[in-house]
Image (cartoon, helix red, strand yellow):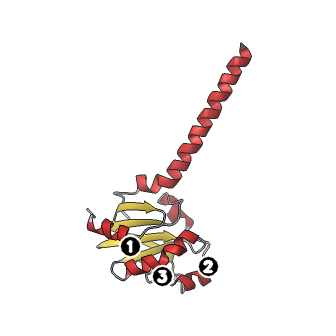
């Protein structure tokens, strides 16, 4: 009887652990989408990837697309030509996660201003998946998309922005 009780307790503990791990993974992926809409993000500071000097991006006015990416992220690199097309029509900025590889940055040639941010930026915004793209209007985050994004999707976002 005691052994049955112990087995039941072990099963409950294991089941609880599995649930916690699953919830953690779901939040890691969707945390930014859940937590960020409605939050203010008026400016970002970091290093200019070309000069390695301090730089800042003002997000306080108008509609802005903010792409959060890394030079070591294959999905981020693959969506860059599409983001460059969007940047030809709309205000686009980028935030790059360290570790930064200048050669890759030069090769993908983003057509929009970017900064290399400190790890705290990503932690503060619950960014654990790259790429992540934000729609910001007058310094307030309106929408979050985790994963690669297309110009058509961004056009829909902008058209339907609150």
Residue sitting nearer the eye, 129 or 138: 129
Secondary structure beneath disc 1?
A: helix
Q: Which residue is mark 3?
A: 110
Residue visible at 59% across and 34% down? 16
Percent of width and height locating residue 22: 56, 44
- Callout 2 environment at 10 Å: few (<14), some (14 to 19), or many (20+)? few
- The answer to whether mark 1 and mark 3 are in CB contact below 8 A is no
- Lower position in the chain sequence, tag 3 or tag 2: 2
**Would you say residue 60 is visible in this rendering?**
no
- The answer to whether mark 3 and mark 2 are in CB contact below 8 A is no
Percent of width and height locating residue 45: 47, 73
Q: What is the distance, in whole Å, between disc 2 and disc 1 at their CAs?
A: 25 Å
Q: Nearer the viewer, mark 2 or mark 1?
A: 1
Q: Which residue is mark 1?
A: 151
Percent of width and height locating residue 80: 48, 77
Above or below, 56 relative to 20? below
Residue visible at 56% across and 65% down? 119
Q: Nearer the viewer, mark 1 or mark 3?
A: 1
Q: Which residue is mark 2?
A: 101
Residue visible at 50% across and 65% down? 121
- Callout 3 environment at 10 Å: few (<14), some (14 to 19), or many (20+)? some
Percent of width and height locating residue 97: 55, 70
Residue 159 image-quadrant placement: bottom left
- Callout 1 environment at 10 Å: few (<14), some (14 to 19), or many (20+)? some
Number of numbered labels in the structure image: 3
């Amino acid at each position: 009887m005691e052994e049955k009780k112990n087995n039941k307790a072990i099963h409950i503990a294991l089941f609880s652990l599995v649930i916690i791990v699953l919830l953690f993974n779901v939040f890691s992926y969707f945390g930014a989408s859940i937590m960020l809409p409605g939050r203010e993000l008026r400016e970002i500071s970091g290093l200019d990837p070309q000069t390695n000097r301090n730089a800042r991006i003002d997000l306080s006015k108008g509609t802005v697309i903010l792409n959060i990416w890394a030079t070591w992220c294959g999905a981020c690199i693959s969506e860059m030509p599409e983001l460059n097309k969007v940047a030809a029509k709309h205000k686009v900025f980028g935030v790059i996660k360290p570790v930064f590889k200048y050669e890759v940055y030069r090769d993908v040639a983003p057509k929009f201003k970017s900064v290399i941010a400190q790890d705290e930026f990503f932690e503060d915004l619950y960014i654990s998946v790259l790429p992540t793209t934000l729609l910001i209007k007058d310094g307030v985050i309106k929408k979050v998309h985790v994963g690669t994004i297309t110009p058509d999707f961004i056009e829909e976002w902008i058209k339907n922005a609150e």
